[in-house]
Image (cartoon, grey):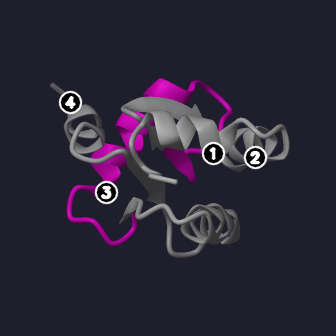
Amino acid sequence: MDQVTKLVSERAVVVFTSSRCSMCDSVTFLLSNLGVNATVYKLDKEQRGRELERELARRLGRGSPVVPAVFIGRSLVGGINRVMGLHLAGELVPMLKNAGALWL
């Protein structure tokens, strides 16, 4: 089992970020405002950050930004565009509820 898989299996919502990424701040702010207690890993602050970044890059594919990378219910949702698109379409909250990240 790779490190990313292990980490995302431990919580309902996991976000991989960087401390220098404003889009990362936006997605974590949105999730927090929705009442989600996401686990956030700042790759530039993690001891194994480079290894995690390589694993995420492999999953996301060529040309995609590595951060933010949002996992809900152990599944990779994507970055800020995908998360905001789901939110605007009214699909994010049900997804969070199904994953057990929201109780209301």
Q: Are marks 1 and 4 in contact (CB under 8 Å)?
A: no
Question: Of marks 2 and 4, which one's residue comes earlier in the chain?
Answer: 4
Q: Which residue is labeled 1 in the image?
A: 93
Q: Which residue is labeled 2 in the image?
A: 87
Above or below, 97 against 41 in this view is above
The 10 Å Cα crowd at callout 2, few under 14, some 14 to 19, many 20 or more, is some
Asked whether, in this view, residue 20 is left or right of residue 88, the answer is left
Q: Are marks 2 and 3 in contact (CB under 8 Å)?
A: no
Residue 50 is one of the magenta-drawn residues = yes
Q: Quadrant of residue 43?
A: bottom left
Question: Of marks 1 and 4, which one's residue comes earlier in the chain?
Answer: 4
Residue in the foreground of this view, choosing between 5 and 34: 34
Q: Of the residues shown, which amino acid type is indicated by label 2?
A: His
Above or below, 26 against 75 in this view is below
Q: Of the residues shown, which amino acid type is indicated by label 1?
A: Val
Q: Quadrant of residue 86?
A: top right
Question: Of marks 1 and 3, which one's residue comes earlier in the chain?
Answer: 3
Query: Label 2 vs label 3: CA separation?
Result: 28 Å
Q: Which residues are magenta?
A: 43-70
Q: Are marks 2 and 1 in contact (CB under 8 Å)?
A: yes
Tag nearer the camera, 2 or 4: 2
Above or below, 73 against 36 in this view is above
Q: Which residue: 57% across, 53% down?
A: 68
Query: Label 2 vs label 1: CA separation?
Result: 7 Å
Which element type, helix, strand or loop, lies under badge 2? Answer: helix
Label number found at residue 2: 4
Any part of residue 57 in sight: no
Q: Which residue: 68% across, 71% down?
A: 22
